[in-house]
Image (spheres, coloured by chain):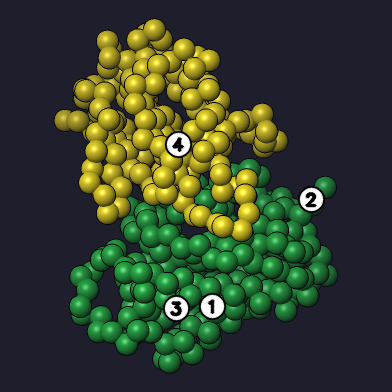
Chain colours: A yellow, B green
């Protein structure tokens, strides 16, 4: 039986065939789905902030793009994934609320999260196969370890797969 | 340097936050009651410090659609404030104000037209405005709020905005949960996110 394992906010998990990983309602947070097609070992991280270096209280490594991605990769490799085979799909990083009045740093965190995730994946030489980011709506994502397909559901929108 | 440690609030600080929630929400309830011209009772607010993963579960069922109204705060208190309504409560209030029959809509209908959307934003504006003016009266602090922004989406996605703000200082979110109560069961939640220095100002203004 295939099981769908939930990944919370500021959380990360790894699974094997035939399980799926899911995270609910990514707003400005970013979901990074990592997949090794040879071993079908799958990882999903739900990060909230771009960098652990900007924050003093940074003990929760799943909260940040930099430490979260590295930790997910580490756990996948422990399970037997091959680094050279791992690819990524990313979703989220929306700007949920628009304000005309000012360019507010806290409200642009979605875009900054996406930027950081791309930069870090680039530095780690993990190719990004697909992305569904930005805009102004939340996304629920499910990654299937059998196919590596990332299903994205949003309120009032048709489901899509990348 | 901020003195407040959100993960280790003492009983008095916790009670003060609860009382602020009580007064703010009480004021908001009165405003709401006048607006729809019906008596609304309010439950005693619950003040909770929650982990990120618990937040959405406490507010609604998993994957519930909610209306979220966000305001940015400036002045003596910097930060943001959010007011959330579950989607059926939002519909009830909008219909009440527009004098429409509630039976016209299916449960969980998320389609609000332009007029309804703007009424909902105004409801949020009045509720958060009366909450903040109570807080301002109590603390004698100046609070300037932005024009509210409204979004209807999954609770988790909407809450990610205040959660990210809290995530910069710790791993918990301070939630003030208020249940409005009348025949139609209106459920509302306030999330106040002052910056750490502003917590000090709030406590300081109250002699703590």
Contact check, label 3 and label 2, Cβ < 8 Å: no
- Image quarter where the C terminus of chain A lies is top left
Same subunit, tags 3 and 4: no
Residue at mark 1: chain: B
| Looking at the image, residue A53 lies above or below residue B171 | above
Dot 4 falls on a residue whose secondary structure is: strand
Answer left or right for B18 relative to A157.
right
Q: Which residue is mark 4?
A: A30
- Image quarter where the N terminus of chain A lies is top left
Q: Quote the CA–CA distance across marks 4 and 2.
A: 30 Å
Nearest the eye: B96 or B200: B96
Q: Which residue is mark 3?
A: B180
Contact check, label 1 and label 3, Cβ < 8 Å: no
| Identity of the residue drawn at 38% across and 84% down | B97
Specify the label residue B126 is tagged with. Answer: 1
Answer whether residue B12 is visible to the viewer in this image. Answer: no
Q: Nearer the viewer, mark 1 or mark 3?
A: 1
Tally of numbered discs: 4
| Looking at the image, residue B13 lies above or below residue B53 | below
Q: Quote the CA–CA distance across marks 1 and 2.
A: 31 Å
Q: Quote the CA–CA distance across marks 1 and 3.
A: 15 Å
Sequence-wise, which precedes: disc 1 or disc 2? 2
Q: Quote the CA–CA distance across marks 4 and 1.
A: 33 Å
| Identity of the residue drawn at 39% across and 49% down | A137
Specify the label residue B93 is tagged with. Answer: none
Dot 3 falls on a residue whose secondary structure is: strand
Dot 1 falls on a residue whose secondary structure is: helix
Q: Position of residue A122 (x, y in %)?
A: 49, 17
Q: Nearer the viewer, mark 1 or mark 2?
A: 1
Q: Which residue is mark 2?
A: B2
Nearest the eye: A1 or B151: B151
Q: Position of residue B20 (x, y in %)?
A: 65, 72
């Amino acid at each position: 039986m295939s099981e769908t394992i939930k990944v919370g906010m500021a959380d990360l998990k790894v699974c094997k065939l035939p399980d799926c990983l899911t995270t609910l309602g990514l707003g400005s947070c970013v979901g990074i789905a990592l997949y090794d097609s040879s071993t079908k070992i799958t990882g999903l991280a739900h990060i909230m902030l771009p960098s652990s270096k900007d924050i003093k209280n940074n003990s929760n490594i799943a909260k940040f793009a930099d430490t979260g991605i590295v930790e997910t990769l580490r756990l996948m490799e422990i399970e037997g994934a091959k680094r050279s085979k791992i690819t990524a799909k990313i979703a989220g990083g929306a700007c949920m609320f628009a304000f005309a009045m000012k360019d507010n740093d806290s409200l642009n965190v979605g875009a900054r999260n996406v930027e950081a995730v791309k930069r870090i994946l680039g530095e780690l030489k993990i190719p990004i196969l697909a992305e569904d980011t930005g805009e102004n709506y939340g996304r629920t994502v499910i990654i299937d370890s059998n196919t590596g397909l990332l299903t994205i559901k949003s309120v009032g929108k048709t489901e899509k797969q990348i | 340097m901020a003195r407040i440690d959100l993960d280790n609030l003492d009983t008095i600080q916790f009670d003060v936050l609860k009382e602020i929630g009580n007064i703010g929400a009480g004021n908001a309830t009165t405003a709401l009651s006048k607006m729809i011209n019906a008596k609304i009772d309010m439950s005693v607010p619950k003040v909770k410090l929650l982990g990120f993963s618990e937040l959405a579960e406490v507010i609604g069922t998993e994957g519930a659609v909610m209306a979220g109204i966000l305001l940015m705060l400036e002045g003596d208190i910097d930060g943001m404030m959010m007011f959330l309504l579950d989607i059926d409560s939002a519909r009830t209030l909008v219909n009440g104000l527009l004098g429409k029959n509630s039976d016209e809509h299916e449960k969980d209908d998320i389609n609000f037209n332009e007029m309804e959307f703007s009424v909902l934003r105004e409801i949020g504006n009045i509720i958060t405005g009366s909450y903040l003016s109570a807080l301002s009266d109590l603390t004698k602090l100046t609070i300037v709020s932005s024009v509210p922004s409204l979004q209807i989406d999954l609770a988790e996605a909407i809450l990610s905005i205040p959660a990210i703000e809290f995530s910069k200082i710790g791993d918990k979110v301070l939630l003030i949960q208020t249940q409005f109560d009348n025949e139609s069961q209106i459920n509302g939640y306030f999330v106040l996110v002052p910056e750490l220095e502003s917590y000090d100002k709030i406590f300081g203004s109250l002699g703590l």
